[in-house]
């Protein structure tokens, strides 16, 4: 069994709707369990213990929400321990700017997480198309994680 953490922030529910779709996609893959956590209820241990992570944030002033940034500031000490975990990102904004996504992707690279698919930028209320894209993103992350797990097992034999 692998565990995927869907770590997000949302104030008015849009990013949460995207996060729910990512979670739905990930848990549709056999052998995967999903931990869906709003970042203010998450701890650094959640990041340590998961096998892969999906990060979601609203766009606040062309950056991720401050509370997401704060989570990673507090996780600095475990940076080496989470390196290499498969990761994807998604954002919700009033406009179509991808700057919040890029800020999440800079964090992915600072923590040396492994970006396994292009991120998603949703504008305004999430459309059906974006929700489906998020579900696929979750599936892709889960499949990649399962594949890495089985190749690690083969290496260990
Ligand atoms: C403090 C604040 C700053 C924001 N800054 C931006 C911004 O720079 N660009 C943008 O497109 N939307 C901006 N927005 C709009 C939110 O990103 C947008 O409404 C988002 O969909 C909210 O997501 P949520 O429903 O998950 O909270 C801002 C909203 C707030 C509250």
Image (cartoon, grey):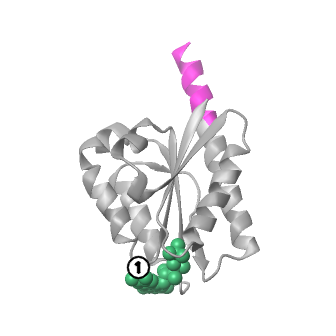
Q: Is residue 33 above or below residue 104?
A: above
At x 46%, y 77%, the residue is 59
Q: Nearer the viewer, residue 147 or 74?
A: 74
**Ligand 1 has an atom within 8 Å of the beta carbon of the residue at disc 1:** yes
At x 70%, y 57%, the residue is 136
Name the spot of residue 55 as percent of width and height, x first. Answer: 49, 58
Q: Which quadrant of the figure has residue 21? A: bottom right
At x 46%, y 42%, the residue is 85
Q: Is residue 145 above or below residue 125?
A: above
Q: Is residue 7 above or below residue 86?
A: below
Name the spot of residue 17 as percent of width and height, x first. Answer: 63, 67
Q: Which residue is mark 1?
A: 60
Please check the rendered image and state whether residue 89 is part of the magenta-colored stretch, yes or no. Answer: no
Asked if one can make out residue 128 in the rendered structure from this viewpoint, the answer is yes
At x 42%, y 64%, the residue is 104
Q: Determine crowd level at label 1: few under 14, some 14-19, many 20+ residues with C-alpha closer than 10 A.
A: some
State the residue lying farthest toward the top.
Answer: 157
The boundaries of the magenta stretch are: 146-157
Name the spot of residue 20 as percent of width and height, x first. Answer: 63, 59
State the residue lying farthest toward the bottom.
Answer: 95
- Split into 4 quadrants, where in the image is the N terminus? top right
Left or right, 146 with reference to 76: right
Q: Which quadrant of the figure has residue 105? A: bottom left
Name the spot of residue 87 as percent of width and height, x first. Answer: 51, 51
* Magenta: main secondary structure: helix
């Amino acid at each position: 069994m692998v565990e995927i953490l869907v770590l997000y922030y949302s104030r008015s529910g849009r990013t949460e709707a995207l996060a729910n779709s990512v979670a739905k996609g990930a848990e549709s893959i056999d052998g995967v369990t999903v931990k869906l956590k709003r970042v203010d209820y998450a701890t650094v241990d959640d990041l340590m213990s998961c096998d892969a992570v999906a990060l979601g944030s609203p766009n606040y002033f062309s950056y991720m929400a401050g509370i997401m940034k704060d989570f990673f500031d507090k996780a600095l000490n475990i940076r080496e321990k989470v390196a290499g975990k498969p990761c994807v990102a998604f954002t919700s904004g009033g406009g179509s700017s991808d700057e919040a996504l890029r800020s999440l992707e800079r964090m992915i690279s600072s923590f040396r997480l492994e970006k396994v698919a292009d991120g998603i930028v949703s504008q305004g209320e999430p459309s059906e198309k974006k929700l489906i894209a998020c579900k696929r993103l979750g599936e892709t992350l889960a499949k990649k994680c399962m594949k890495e797990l089985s190749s690690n097992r083969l290496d260990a034999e």
